Amino acid sequence: MSATKVTVLLLSCLFCTSALADSPFKDLQFGNSKLQILGDLKKACHTQKPMTDDALAAKIMSTEENQRHVRDAKIALERNNQQNYWDAIGKVECPEM
């Protein structure tokens, strides 16, 4: 096998491995930000009845305005901007419980 083919093969393997290595971390990071946002929304909304996280998230995300505020909170969290994060969390309209 020529040196060019071996080099191309090795580079291909390196790029595939680095792409696979990023995926679990990004999923974990997404999961952590989702848990943090949901936890902070639970505190802000003062739920009266016990409710599963999925049910609460579905109720909160049922309006477009809340979806926008949650998206803004996620972006602020990714950018480590606490002021914008709490502003966005504060704008979420809590569902009737």
Image (cartoon, rainbow, N blue to C red):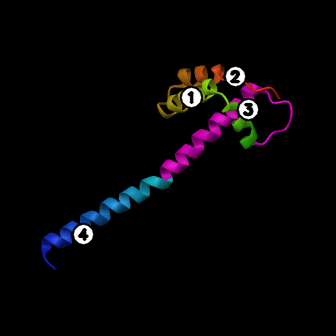
Q: Position of residue 90 (x, y in %)?
A: 65, 20
Under circle 1, the secondary element is helix
- Residue type at the position of mark 1: Ala
Point out which mark residue 9 bears: 4
Place of residue 88 in the rendered image (x, y in percent of width and height, measured from the top left): 59, 23
Whole-angstrom CA distance, mark 2 to mark 4, is 53 Å
Q: Earlier in the sequence, mark 2 or mark 1?
A: 1
Asked if 6 appears above or below 58 in the picture, the reply is below
The residue carrying mark 3 is 42
Q: Residue at x 63, y 26 (%)?
A: 66
Corner quadrant of residue 3:
bottom left
Q: Distance of mark 4 from mark 3, alpha carbons?
A: 50 Å
Q: Which residue is at the front of the view, 62 or 83?
A: 62
Q: Quadrant of the C terminus?
A: top right
Q: Which residue appears farthest toward the bottom when viewing the image?
A: 1
Q: Quadrant of the N terminus?
A: bottom left
Q: Secondary structure at mark 3?
A: helix
Where 3 sits versus 95, above or below? below
Three-letter amino acid code at the position of disc 4: Leu
- The residue that label 2 is drawn on is 93
Q: Which residues are magenta?
A: 25-52
Judging by the rendered image, the residue that carries numbered circle 1 is 73
Query: Could you tell whether 76 is left or right of 2 in the image?
Result: right
Helix, strand or loop under label 2:
loop
